[in-house]
Image: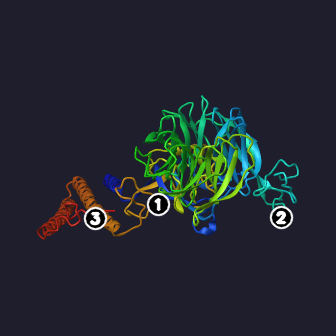
């Protein structure tokens, strides 16, 4: 009898294991799980409801990480692998613009026009006065200016570029700006506006700006860095005529090295300008063409053939303008979304009566095109391609053109070494001279709008993507595998490496600082943070409930974390029916085994033999009845046409499209 009980217990264990194998009870295991999850910034604003993170980008652009402002921080499990981190970046004051009170004009040669100079002039846009002179690389020509931020200067004949960075602070009470300097030692700060005898504010305590030459770097091997600009990841690009190529420089370290192999342009690039969608445009004078470089891949496309392209500019909509020195025209190219476009003709050609000599070109906020001509010494404004007006400043060989943030046009005379500030009155179609600089002390071989400020949209830009925030809200990507899945974490390797070596807190997590870079100043808010990462987690497998779980069961064809709905009820009912059918078979087999053992162990006792036979017969009768009932129901369902009610080919298979 004891042997019979042992066999019964063993059979019961078999049933339990079978039930477990049928995924009826829960099991737990540690497995790597890819987890897309909305998380919160751990140092965000708890009053916002979802812990958004607010930050400000300073004039000239920069990062949120400094000694004053914290980076946004997230908390992730120790040892996890990160594949993507992104958030929505909202510009909270899209109408605010960052202006600068300066325009920058290089002095390329001394008055003899032969001896190279190495000066760049900081000019007040208020009264055209010279604020300060800085010694930079030899024969400076093109400049790239970030409003209120860094100033980059390229050498017309050399291999170098220079970087000037602003120093900010407050002048002491009564700080004297009579000699353009604030501070007791007269070496610290510049006044923000007119420095011709005024103090830095009525109390002598308004913010002032002074620039410092940080250093030089040589992106080229052969002299002639004729163009310099920036992309909207903050990196600097140079157009190297001597090397016939373009170079990409790191924004973070200075002096620095190149970020990628040089892009071969096949000719002498004469200028460069970056748009707001990850393209660098090259006016290739030696190759006689307009070219486009994709900043991410470095791929170069030839866009159009132009005879002796000179100046190059971009408007706030990323349309490109190129002046043709040979025939006196300006070509406009409408922006094409996506990678650099292939060859296509200019959308518009602006043309004057002067056959040749068109040099600098710039575009104001109204869309008016400003250009200068060195052959007739005229300054032009195009209202549209067929309507233009001109003025003669009184000096010759006009070259550089710039638009400041107040909408005034600037033109530089190479012969006279003077810059002129004009207002164009589009009511009376006349030019009003606002002021002119004193003699700059030499010949200014400035090119196009790079003598000053080019147009910026009223939005920010982000790190890790070439796009700019052209609407108030944009997804800011800190790092991504490019697919939004767990297939590749190379771009997030730095975060993953940190998580593998950090000291976790009491919850097993590590806090990570995320750096945000923007070239456009303003106040921003980060929200809707989404992190995709993989971690070894305790996952529940099996069980009857197919929905509303903490973790997804990888063995099921559906997502077990989704909220329960009618489809899940059908799946649950199907699981219960399948379980009961399996249970019937198991109980039948077990009962037959137990009945057979009792029959064997009767030792000839007639009553026990009869009882064993009756039990076996009852078990078989019950199983046959269940089987007959199923056959009858199936026959009825087939006869009435209920063969495929849920699209699975069998009425007894319950499923639902989740």
Depth check, front residue: 548 or 48: 48
- The residue identified by callout 3 is 577
Give the label on residue 550, or none: 1
- Asked if one can make out residue 655 in the rendered structure from this viewpoint, the answer is yes
Please say if 291 is above or below 13: above
Depth check, front residue: 379 or 264: 379
* Label 2 SS: loop
- Whether the residues at callouts 2 and 3 have beta carbons within 8 Å, the answer is no
Please say if 417 is above or below 267: below
- The residue identified by callout 2 is 202
Spot the residue most to the top. 222
Locate residue 641 relative to residue 525 in the image: left or right.
left
**Marked residue nearer the N-terminal end (3 or 1):** 1
Instruction: Place residue 441 in its image quadrant.
Output: top right
**Marked residue nearer the N-terminal end (2 or 3):** 2
* Label 1 SS: loop
Q: Give percent across and percent down for residue 10.
A: 34, 52
* Label 3 SS: helix
Q: Where, quadrant-wise, is the N terminus in this rendering?
A: bottom left
């Amino acid at each position: 009898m004891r042997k019979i009980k042992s066999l019964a217990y063993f059979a019961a264990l078999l049933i339990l294991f079978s039930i477990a194998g049928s995924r009826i009870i829960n099991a737990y295991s540690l497995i790597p799980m890819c987890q897309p999850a909305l998380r919160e910034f751990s140092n965000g604003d708890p009053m916002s409801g979802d812990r958004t993170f607010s930050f400000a980008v300073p004039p000239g652009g920069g990062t949120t990480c400094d000694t004053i402002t914290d980076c946004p921080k997230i908390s992730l499990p120790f040892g996890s692998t990160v594949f993507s981190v992104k958030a929505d970046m909202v510009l909270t004051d899209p109408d605010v613009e960052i202006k600068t009170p300066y325009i920058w004009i290089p002095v390329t040669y001394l008055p003899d026009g032969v001896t190279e100079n190495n000066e760049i002039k900081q000019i007040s846009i208020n009264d055209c006065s010279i604020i300060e002179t800085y010694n930079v690389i030899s024969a400076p020509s093109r400049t790239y200016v970030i409003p209120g931020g860094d100033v980059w200067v390229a050498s017309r004949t050399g291999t170098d570029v220079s970087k000037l960075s602003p120093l900010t602070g407050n002048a002491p009470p009564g700080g004297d700006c009579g000699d353009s300097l604030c501070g007791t030692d007269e070496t610290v700060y510049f006044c923000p506006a007119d420095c011709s005898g005024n103090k830095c504010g009525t109390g002598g305590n308004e913010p002032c700006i002074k620039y410092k030459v940080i250093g030089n770097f040589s992106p080229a091997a052969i002299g002639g860095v004729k163009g310099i600009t920036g992309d909207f990841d903050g990196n600097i690009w140079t157009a190297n005529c001597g090397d016939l190529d373009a170079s990409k420089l790191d924004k973070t370290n200075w002096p620095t090295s190149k970020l990628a192999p040089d892009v071969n342009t096949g000719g002498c690039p004469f200028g460069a300008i970056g748009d707001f969608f990850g393209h660098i445009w090259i006016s290739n004078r030696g190759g006689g063409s307009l070219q486009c470089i994709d900043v991410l891949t470095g791929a170069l496309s030839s866009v159009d053939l132009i005879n002796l392209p000179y100046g190059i500019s971009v408007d706030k909509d990323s349309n490109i303008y190129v002046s043709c020195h040979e025939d006196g025209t300006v070509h406009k190219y409408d922006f094409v979304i996506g990678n650099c476009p292939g060859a296509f003709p200019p959308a518009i050609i602006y043309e004057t009566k002067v056959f040749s000599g068109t040099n600098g070109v710039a575009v104001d906020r109204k869309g008016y095109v400003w250009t200068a001509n060195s052959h007739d010494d005229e300054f032009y404004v195009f209202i549209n391609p067929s309507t233009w007006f001109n003025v003669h400043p009184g000096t010759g060989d006009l070259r550089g053109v710039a638009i400041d943030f107040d909408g005034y046009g600037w033109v530089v005379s190479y012969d006279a070494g003077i810059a002129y500030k004009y207002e164009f009155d589009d009511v009376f179609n006349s030019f009003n001279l606002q002021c002119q600089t004193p003699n700059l002390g030499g010949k200014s071989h400035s090119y196009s709008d790079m003598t000053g400020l080019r147009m910026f949209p009223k939005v920010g830009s982000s790190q890790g993507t070439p796009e700019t925030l052209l609407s108030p809200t944009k997804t800011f990507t800190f790092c991504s595998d490019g697919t939004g899945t767990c297939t590749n974490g190379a771009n997030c390797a730095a975060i993953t490496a940190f998580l593998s070596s950090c000291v976790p807190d009491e919850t097993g997590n590590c806090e990570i600082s995320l750096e945000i870079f923007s070239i456009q100043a303003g106040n921003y808010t980060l929200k809707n943070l989404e992190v995709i990462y993989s971690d070894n987690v305790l996952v529940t497998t099996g069980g009857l409930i197919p929905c509303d779980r903490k973790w997804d069961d990888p063995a099921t064809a559906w997502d077990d974390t989704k909220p329960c709905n009618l489809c899940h009820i059908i799946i649950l009912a199907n699981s219960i029916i399948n379980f009961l059918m399996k249970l019937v078979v198991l109980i039948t087999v077990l009962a037959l085994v137990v009945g057979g053992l009792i029959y064997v162990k009767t030792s000839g006792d007639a009553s026990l033999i009869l009882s064993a036979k009756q039990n076996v017969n009852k078990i078989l009768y019950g199983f046959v009845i269940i089987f007959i009932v199923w056959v009858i129901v199936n026959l009825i369902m087939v006869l009435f046409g209920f063969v495929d009610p849920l699209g699975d080919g069998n009425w007894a298979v319950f499923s639902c499209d989740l």
